[in-house]
Amino acid sequence: MNITMVKGLFIIAAIYDGVLGLLFLFSPGLAFEMFEVTPPNHFGYVQFPAILLLIFAAMFWRVAQDPIPNRFIMLYGVALKTGYSGLVFYYMLTTGVPQMWVPWAWADLVFLVLFLVSWNYTGQLARASAD
């Protein structure tokens, strides 16, 4: 891990969550149609989380610009990715979940691990520069 990799990771995370956020905000029916999943009875249930994804995309972009002073934001990303992947995997193992949500849960699990590695690495850099 190096600082360039941390920046690249958070640029990718910003684009990933930003694209998903835009998709579900402005064309919420498209993903449901593509995966042949019955949409919720009101798209507001999907559009509000889409707005949250756009907010997180902006936060990840901020981390990418200056990772060390913005490393605290990484833990919010860890929480987001834990929440999403945890719920999807829980329902996948219990009552079931539409398949459309599963690939994103795996992607979020990878992001979760990489965010933790980045948080640890930038913490080491911050401590080293403080000495």
Image: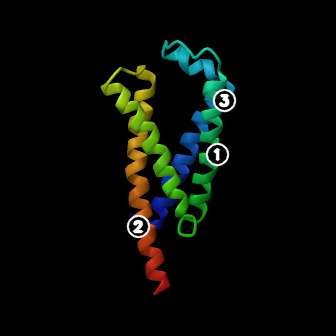
The amino acid at mark 3 is: Leu
Callout 3: helix, strand or loop? helix
Residue furthest bottom as drawn: 131
Mark 3–mark 1 Cα distance, whole angstroms, equals 12 Å
Towards the viewer: 38 or 67: 38
In the rendered view of the protein, which quadrant contains the N terminus?
Answer: bottom left
The numbered mark, 1 or 2, whose residue comes first in the sequence reads: 1
**What is the quadrant of residue 52 in the picture?**
top right
The amino acid at mark 2 is: Tyr
The numbered mark, 3 or 1, whose residue comes first in the sequence reads: 3
Q: Residues within 10 Å of mark 2 (few under 14, many from 20)?
A: some
* Circle 1 residue: 55
Residue 25's tag is 3
* Circle 2 residue: 121
Q: Who's the residue at 43% across and 61% down the image?
A: 118
Mark 1–mark 2 Cα distance, whole angstroms, equals 24 Å
Callout 1: helix, strand or loop? helix
Q: Are marks 1 and 2 in contact (CB under 8 Å)?
A: no
Q: Who's the residue at 60% across and 46% down the image?
A: 57
The amino acid at mark 1 is: Ile
